[in-house]
């Protein structure tokens, strides 16, 4: 008998590379190419003046941030949950809601953290294949299950389902918790937040990492019925009462106050995405109809890994997944106009 016999062994999630190289065009982790709202910088300066407060624990109830979210989304705080990025929020949700013997369902091609959480928490799960167009067939989920997780828009495919489609889907699964992961919804998807009062079993998660340019602060949130949020908070406070740090609470609250800037930068990303999509098509690429801040693209005459390596030689980093069905696709984050123009120039020369 060894102490290692009691170790929980899992295959961990592999995050996107954070290269330690100067002067690169980083298009591999779906970060927003624009800075956070100007009010965040102002709040940061004020935070520096009161730095002595950092010796104290942060507010366990995340009051400043939850109050700002409550006002922004016009929802009572009892229907809000906050955590250290949507990864933390989703992890808590897996822990809280999936404890039965029936498998939790999610697509075979989706955010690759879902199966990791299921494994580490000992949750039975089953992946449901997307169709040949990388889309979800709702009927495929009409099997006995202990919960469902749908990323909408999906990653890494970028495809979004309409709110109407999602509501019909949720209606058929009212006996289990349905989690809708909306990390990319601001770039063209339709949010299901307006459905949380209608479906007590629905949990919608979002993040500040993508559209709000605050990946470095790790801020995530969930929306749901008062009952489902209460269950989620019970689990959170049983694991760690102080999950979010003081700077994140203050700066995250400040980012919600400049809605005009937020919408302007989201629109800029969408405009650049559509330009890049058109240019890649001219070069022979095929891709899904992305409603995110990235493109999921493949070239019929060149291997994705070869293209990735050629781009890297020129200081441009994109994401390649060595996984079944998608190993000849690249996920290309949308950068600034200048960054995407340079990428297209390099590809044009290479191809």
Image (spheres, rainbow, N blue to C red):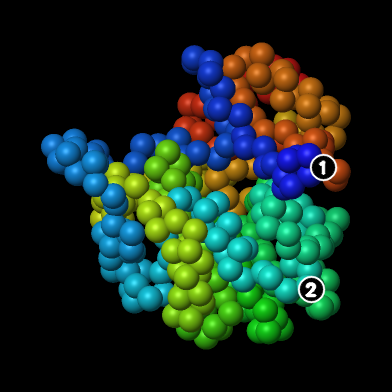
Q: What secondary structure is found at the residue carrying circle 1?
A: loop
Q: Residue at x 62, y 71 (%)?
A: 97
Image quadrant where one finds the C terminus? top right
Is residue 208 visible in the rendered image? The answer is no
Give the quarter of the image for residue 142.
bottom right
Is residue 243 visible in the rendered image? The answer is yes
Q: Residue at x 61, y 29 (%)?
A: 17
Q: Nearer the viewer, residue 8 or 109?
A: 8
Q: Earlier in the sequence, mark 1 or mark 2?
A: 1
Q: Nearer the viewer, residue 345 or 155?
A: 155
Query: Going by the image, does 140 lie left or right of 63?
Result: right
Residue 297, compared with residue 116, is above or below; it is above
Q: Residue at x 56, y 83 (%)?
A: 199
Mark 1: give few (<14), some (14-19) or many (20+) Cα within 10 Å: few
Mark 1 and mark 2: Cα distance apart in space? 32 Å
In percent of width and height, residue 158 lies at 65, 51
Q: Residue at x 79, y 73 (%)?
A: 102
Numbered badge on residue 102: 2
Count of numbered marks: 2
Q: Which residue is mark 1?
A: 1
Residue at the outermost left position: 49
Query: Going by the image, does 288 lie left or right of 339?
Result: right
């Amino acid at each position: 008998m060894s102490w290692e016999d009691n170790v929980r062994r899992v295959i961990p999630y592999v995050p996107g590379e954070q290269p330690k190289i100067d002067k690169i065009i980083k298009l591999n982790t779906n970060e927003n190419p624009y800075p956070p709202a100007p009010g965040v910088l102002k709040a940061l300066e004020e935070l520096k003046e009161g730095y002595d407060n950092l010796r104290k624990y942060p507010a366990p109830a995340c009051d400043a941030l939850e109050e700002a979210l409550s006002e922004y989304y016009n929802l009572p705080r009892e229907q809000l949950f906050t955590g250290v990025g949507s990864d933390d929020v989703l992890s808590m949700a897996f822990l809280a809601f999936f404890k039965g013997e029936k498998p939790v369902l999610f697509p075979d091609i989706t955010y690759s953290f879902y199966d990791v959480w299921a494994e580490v928490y000992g949750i039975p799960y089953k992946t449901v294949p997307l169709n040949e167009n990388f889309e979800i067939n709702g009927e495929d989920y009409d099997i006995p299950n202990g919960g469902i997780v749908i990323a909408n828009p999906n990653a890494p495919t970028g495809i979004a389902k309409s709110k109407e489609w999602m509501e019909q889907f949720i209606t058929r699964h009212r006996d289990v918790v349905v989690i809708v992961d909306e990390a990319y919804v601001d770039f063209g998807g339709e949010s299901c937040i307006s459905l949380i009062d209608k479906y007590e079993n629905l949990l919608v998660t979002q993040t500040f990492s993508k559209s709000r340019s605050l990946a470095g602060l790790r801020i995530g949130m969930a929306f749901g019925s008062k009952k489902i949020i209460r269950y989620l908070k019970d689990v959170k406070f049983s694991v760690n009462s102080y999950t979010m740090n003081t700077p994140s609470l203050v700066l995250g609250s400040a980012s919600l106050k400049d809605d005009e800037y937020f919408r302007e930068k989201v629109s800029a990303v969408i405009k650049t995405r559509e330009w890049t999509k058109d240019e890649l098509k001219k070069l022979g690429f095929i891709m899904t109809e992305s409603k995110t801040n990235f493109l999921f693209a493949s070239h019929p005459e060149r291997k994705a890994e070869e293209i990735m390596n050629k781009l890297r030689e020129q200081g441009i980093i994109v994401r390649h997944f060595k996984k079944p069905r998608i190993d000849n696709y690249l996920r290309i984050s949308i950068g600034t106009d200048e960054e995407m123009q340079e990428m297209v120039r390099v590809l044009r020369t290479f191809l």
